[in-house]
Image (spheres, grey):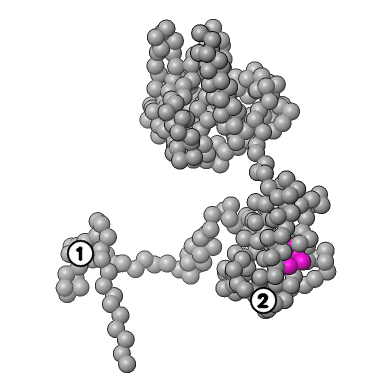
Amino acid sequence: MNTMFDLKCESSSGEEEETEGGESSLTAQVSRCANVSSADLDELEHNRNESSTVKQTVWAVNCFKAWLREKQLTIDFKTVEKSELNSVLREFYGSIRTSKGELYGISSYVGLRAGLNRFISEPPLNRVWNLMQDTEFRAANNVFKGVVKQIRRSGRDITAHYPPISPEDQHLLKHSPALDPGNPRGLLNKVWYDIQLHFGLRGKEGNRHLQADSFALNRDQNGFKYFTMTLHEDAKNMPEKDKKTRRAMYEEPGNPLCPVASLEKYLSKIPTSAKALYLQPKRTYVITDEMWYTPLPLGVNYLSQMLPKICKEAGTRTIYTNHSLRLTAIQRLTESREIMAVCVRYV
């Protein structure tokens, strides 16, 4: 019996069609087979997962191996049978604790099992098992579900939200050299901090995609300046009432730390050809220089660590993350709405 395979494929947009004789309509014949070495393929396979996923897998495996050592157990992951692994995982799920001897939160607990599943089913082991669904691991998964219920009863199923910045630390940050608009680094930090505080942007990628024209300068009926955003983030998780609200950053006349004045100053000190808003400061500068920044944008990883760096320089009691600043922004917005509601009620 002969098996025929149809190897025809539709050309994607932008590709030249081939003639019946197999000749390309391009005047110069281009090979459709790139030269890819075995090392290149290995690297592509190794990079198939996001770095955060790889880190979670490594953490889960190290946690499991540490537990095995403490229990004086050994497992050959290449040859272990499902029945044996099920028995070990049943005990592991039921007894694993944090380094402080406490139950994990549900997200971490789920991450443990997911990381172990990737480790056992993907290269180099390639056992093609599913620790969550294969019937041979039913007993272990029943214990897993029981522990999840135990975690919920203990109250640890509540996601550990990042704390908002305390009023004391907000004051300390606002008046610290880390946010001094009189020098390139301080001005950059302050503009980033002010924008985050007033607009509550989400994610390091969102910050990286901002440009100089992402903000528009306006004046209200009383002549006061204010900035609004012309570039809006994905609002998939935003309440409907928030989608209708256009956030703004108002000037504070007479305040040397006015956020509008800081942003105006920053925009005047960056190259007009810059493709991003947040740029690397010049290594050497003079206060009277027209430009304080290079055209090179700050990377997403640097932007993701902005607030921790600022907090360390300012000496705050708590080293906050960028998430804390977003939560603080949401808190300020909520409070301002409540104040406005009260004012309207008693007018």
Which quarter of the figure has residue 13? bottom left
Q: Provide the residue span drawn in magenta.
A: 89-93
Q: Is residue 267 left or right of residue 311?
A: left
Q: Is residue 305 left or right of residue 271?
A: right
Task: From the viewer's side, name the closer residue of 169 and 16.
Answer: 169
Q: Which residue is mark 2?
A: 82
Which type of secondary structure does the marked residue at label 2 adopt? Answer: helix
Residue drawn 77% across the image and 72% down it: 74
Mark 1 or 2, nearer chain start: 1
The residue type indicated by label 1 comes to Glu
Residue 306 to residue 10: above or below: above
- Look at the image and tell me whether residue 271 can be seen: no
Badge 1: residue crowd in 10 Å (few <14, some 14–19, many ≥20): some
Pair 1/2: label in front: 2
Q: Which residue is mark 1?
A: 17
Residue 104, given in percent of the width and then of the height, sits at: 73, 51
Task: From the viewer's side, name the closer residue of 157 and 122.
Answer: 157
The residue type indicated by label 2 comes to Lys
Magenta stretch containing residue 209, yes or no?
no
The Cα atoms of the two marked residues, 1 and 2, are separated by 51 Å
- Look at the image and tell me whether residue 13 can be seen: yes
Which type of secondary structure does the marked residue at label 1 adopt? Answer: loop
